[in-house]
Image (tube, rainbow, N blue to C red):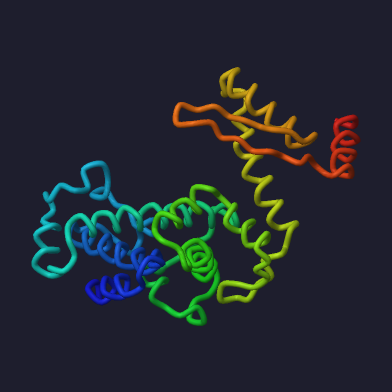
Amino acid sequence: MIRQAYHEAIACGQSYALKCLRCGQLLLEQRAAMAGAQGRTCHSGKSSIHGRNQHSDGDGFSAWLEANCPEISQRTAYRWMEFASLMVEGVNDRLRRQIGEGATIDLAPSEILSQPAEALSGAAREWKQLMLELTAGRTMREASEALVEGNDWRLKNIVNGRALGGFRGEDRKDFPKFILLKLSEIAQHLEHWDGMTPEQQHEILGIFKCAAGGGRAEVARSAGAVVKVLRGWPDEICQLVQATLKKR
């Protein structure tokens, strides 16, 4: 199954993120099984052996890979495993925020990725939908960036006019839903306001000022400044915020 997943990924050319993810996840679960871990209950795809020293062969995984999957190089295998771990953990976190901490999935990630949509239900179906939206038609780098960007990839679908997508055929032009998701993420970050440095607070205040009134927002970093020109919020929203603050 791992070798088949590998060849399917290679055959996809550049837009092979989903196929690489499935192969990497299968490798993760194989390594976990070899270490005696309960891979099926570790839905994140990560285990105690997939950590900082993941390239160590103390568990015999590298030797197993060379003997059983000679066409997969060690470098490719570990790179795809790292990618799978990143994506699975990220989708798990996003799913918990969307449907609550009580959501449980009995299937391993590789099983969800291998099954057709109609065979899944509940949280497993939602999990696959999120993963498909993040990886479909993308390279591993693009999928990783989409995950890090939060919901920006969904907003880009709106801008690009993609009304339908995924296997549910849902309307991607649901602006209230996307704005709610973005504001929810911002609110979570602002919960740490008291623990931020004065410099961080100053930068955030400047961003909100530009967001509300329009202007050039800039965050300077050693790797280069991040600059966004913001048009400002609609008058109706500004008036609503002002009225709400007066009652606060």
| Number of dots carrying numbers | 0
Q: Quadrant of residue 138?
A: bottom left
Going by the image, does 60 lie left or right of 233? left
Q: Residue at x 54, y 31 (%)?
A: 225
In the image, 69: left or right of 149?
left
The quarter of the picture where the N terminus appears is bottom left
> With respect to residue 165, does 74 lie above or below?
above
State the image coordinates of residue 86 (x, y, percent, origin top left).
39, 52
Q: Would you place residue 29 above or below residue 184 in this image?
A: below
Q: Who's the residue at 42% across and 56% down the image?
A: 87
Residue 230: quadrant of the picture? top right
Q: Is residue 183 above or below residue 26?
A: above
Q: Looking at this view, is 123 or 161 the one in front?
A: 161
Image height check: is 207 above or below 125? above
Residue, x 89% and y 44% (percent of image)?
236
The C terminus is located in which quarter? top right
In the image, farthest residue toward the top = 198
- Give the x, y percent position of residue 167: 56, 76
Q: Nearer the viewer, residue 31 or 135?
A: 135
245 sits to left or right of 176: right
Identify the residue at horizontal 74%, vertical 30% (top origin).
209
